Image (cartoon, helix red, strand yellow):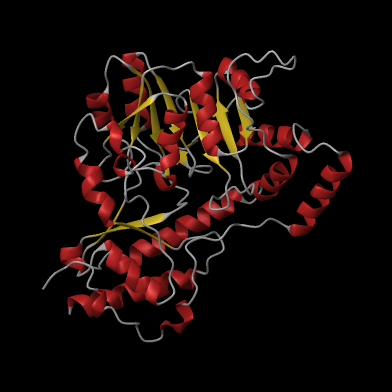
């Protein structure tokens, strides 16, 4: 019996009506009264950008992340573009292919060449050994991703960057609230860049934060977010408009105070998912390194079709049939996307190519009822029994 999609064998489990319309994620909305008051102040002031709320957010974020500088920007993608531009790089930048496309987009937009490297089998984050094999004479930087909110191998990548005299940056889009060996993600490498979009734990509506202990890099990013205009309209380099609005900053400030509670709650949901699904044949999990803490921006499983009875795509279809929304983060991997196929790949990416078809992200959000985890797990178990029985 084939173990492909097998959607013909997937039936709605009994009692599945209460699973209708369970979303993959739902943004955490701050106290509307507080936010409305802040917005009224902003509108009355006539200062909609480059104002006190952005500055307050930058100070609060820097204190929480234990860094000297935070620079608020319009998006994480814009922040990644800025740190690369402000660093005067040339040639190649090593990136994972198992990541959101924006990681590589920021490289390509700077007329740099993304060189894709493989990920670790257990954590799915960029593997230092694979990075080392991808380094060449044109390599000027490494851009790694803290995937799903789990910190990657910070020390291994830092050692590589230091020994080869290249820069190290982190796409920390998922990781505001993550910890590496007790330290907040944000102070590692030359700079880290966070996302504040609606699917994240710290929400601005849209926005990003660059964190760094590099004084010169921070100053260039501040100037760069305003076209690289230092104030006299004599632009220092080719910057862009990446300013965060005051209203977005106020929204982020309103969600910052309760961030720790949301991180802890998502970790509890993730622990419950693992407890419920660990005995289901064919279901695996990405490992968070001992001593680290993930935000669990996403909770992602892997599906071994031969053991489970259906592949990840088929399981997604079965869950959709009972109203459970899922996503295939990240299939296809970036190097296989039409935008990047012409680049080719310097070396094989066996782990990325083997695992990408097997991943499936399940619903998780900061106010999701704990019982929803059990209902999703019940559906996964029933689908397994239906297709494997």
Q: Is residue 191 above or below residue 248?
A: above
* Left or right: 389 as drawn, with respect to 21: left
Residue 144, above or below 322: above
Q: Position of residue 364 (x, y in %)?
A: 47, 61
At a point 24% along the width and 64% down the height, the residue shown is 311
Answer above or below: position of 43 versus 217.
below
* Residue 232, position as x, y percentages in the image: 75, 14
- Which quadrant of the rendered structure holds the N terminus? bottom left
Name the side, left or right, on which 119 lies relative to 30: left
Q: Is residue 290 above or below residue 298?
A: above
Residue furthest out toward the right: 44
Residue 150 placement (x, y as % from top left):
41, 44
Foreground pick, 123 / 51? 51
Q: Residue at x 43, y 24 (%)?
A: 111
* Quadrant that contains the C terminus: bottom left
- Residue 312, picture quadrant: bottom left
């Amino acid at each position: 019996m084939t173990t492909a999609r097998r959607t013909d064998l997937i039936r709605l489990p009994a009692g599945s009506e209460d699973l209708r319309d369970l979303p993959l994620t739902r943004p955490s909305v701050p106290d509307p009264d507080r936010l409305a008051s802040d917005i009224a102040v902003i509108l009355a002031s006539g200062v909609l950008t480059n104002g006190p709320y952005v500055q307050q957010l930058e100070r609060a974020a820097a204190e929480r992340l234990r860094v000297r500088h935070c620079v608020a920007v319009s998006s994480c993608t814009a922040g990644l573009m800025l740190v690369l531009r402000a660093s005067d790089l040339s040639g190649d930048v090593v990136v994972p292919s198992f990541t959101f496309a924006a990681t590589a987009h920021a490289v390509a937009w700077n007329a740099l060449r993304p060189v894709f490297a493989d990920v670790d089998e257990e954590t799915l984050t960029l593997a230092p050994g694979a990075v080392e094999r991808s380094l060449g004479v044109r390599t000027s930087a490494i851009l790694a991703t803290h995937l799903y909110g789990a910190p990657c191998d910070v020390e291994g990548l830092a050692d590589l960057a230091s020994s080869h005299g290249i820069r190290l940056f982190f796409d920390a889009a998922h990781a505001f609230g993550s910890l590496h060996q007790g330290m907040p993600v944000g102070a590692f490498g030359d700079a880290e860049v966070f996302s504040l979009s609606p699917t994240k734990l710290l929400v601005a509506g849209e926005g990003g934060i660059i964190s760094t202990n590099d004084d010169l890099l921070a100053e260039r990013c501040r100037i760069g977010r305003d076209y690289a205009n230092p104030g006299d309209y004599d632009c220092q380099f080719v910057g862009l408009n990446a300013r965060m609005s005051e209203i977005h900053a106020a929204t982020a400030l309103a969600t910052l105070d309760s961030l720790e509670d949301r991180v802890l709650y998502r970790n509890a949901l993730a622990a419950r998912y693992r407890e419920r699904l660990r005995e289901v044949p064919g279901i695996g999990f990405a490992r968070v390194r001992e001593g680290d803490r993930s935000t669990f921006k996403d909770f992602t499983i892997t599906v071994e079709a031969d053991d489970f009875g259906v592949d990840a795509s088929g399981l997604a279809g079965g869950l959709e049939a009972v109203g459970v929304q899922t996503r295939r983060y990240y299939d296809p991997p970036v190097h296989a996307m039409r935008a990047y196929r012409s680049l080719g790949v310097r070396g094989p990416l066996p782990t990325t190519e083997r695992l990408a078809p097997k991943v499936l992200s399940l619903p998780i959000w900061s106010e999701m009822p704990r019982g929803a985890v059990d209902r999703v797990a019940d559906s996964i178990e029933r689908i397994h029994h239906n297709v494997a029985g």
